[in-house]
Amino acid sequence: MAEVLVYVDHVDGAVRKPTLELLTLARRLGDPVAVALGPGAEATAPALAEHGAVRVLTADAPEFTDYLVVPRVDALQAAYDAVSPAAVLVPSSADGKEIAARLAVRIGSGIITDAIDLEADGKGPVATQSVFAAAYTTKSRITRGTPVITVKPNAAPVEPAPAAGTVEALAVTFSAAATGTKVVSRTPRASTGRPELTEAAIVVSGGRGVNGAENFAVIEALADSLGAAVGASRAAVDAGWYPHANQVGQTGKSVSPQLYIASGISGAIQHRAGMQTSKTIVAVNKDAEAPIFDLVDYGVVGDLFTVVPQLTEEINARKG
């Protein structure tokens, strides 16, 4: 059976959920071969094997932490040369898309970004994408070289499928460009205790209707009752009410959770582009004509300061 390279997104050996989703998709195309790089690479093997990786190629070197993405591209190219895969799958993060693009250029292949599903039809992987602000769904196939595809988080379920997960050292020769841009400092982002926005199964977002930074406590309370991430519209971020890191939309982050709750968000096309692929969408807005109601599964016409606290109270009561 053909082998499929899967680039592993991990933090000191802890594998992030989008990688486990990639393994589910990779099994549709062939035998997954995971590529784990940097500190803790070998520690990823048990989780990767549990979710279908037949082999785990690992490499660690100072270049992976001291410099930007080029050393990782060098390593992924080394894995590509060693395996000759049927496809290369990479998580659709900012770094992941840059790594995938650079690899595609090097190996002379086509690339598809932000896929939301993958299937095999005998001629190679067929990727489903949501395009033009999620107004259309397309299916595409790469016709040149080995397909390089980035996949959005929450595109597939995490399905355990135990495999050998044999750990193999990956020999990497770094290019001259690998050390061109050095990381001189890092500042850890303060933890909120909530899920990562792009990976969360539930996202609760607030917009212009929240009417102030202090009022985002109402949104946060609902999110915490659901174990959800907190998002914000561009209008709320531009007003300084919530950090840009939490912006959902075309110029922010793209999310595709199982449940998306939009409170006080009108539903401008820029925001819709970042959340329209959510599985279930709920909106709370006092304007019955707000565009957001055109795409929701459930809509509540009402004041968010009345509706959202009641919803939070009911959820907490049922949990109790």
Image (cartoon, rainbow, N blue to C red):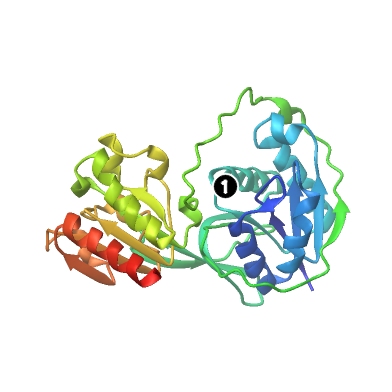
Q: Which amino acid does label 1 sit on?
A: Lys
Foreground pick, 230 / 171: 230
Where is residue 269 drawn, in percent x and y? 27, 53
Where is residue 160 drawn, in percent x and y? 68, 72
Is 27 located above or below residue 207 in the figure? below
Q: Is mark 1 on a helix, strand or loop?
A: helix
Where is residue 161 drawn, in percent x and y? 71, 74
Residue 132 visible? The answer is: no
Residue under the image location 81 percent in, 51 percent down: 42
Foreground pick, 3 / 95: 95
- Residue topped by disc 1: 97
Residue under the image location 25 percent in, 40 percent down: 214
Where is residue 89 drawn, in percent x and y? 65, 58
Foreground pick, 44 / 309: 309
Residue under the image location 39 percent in, 66 percent down: 259
- Picture quadrant of residue 71: top right
Q: Residues within 10 Å of mark 1 (few under 14, many from 20)?
A: many
Left or right relative to 152: residue 65: right
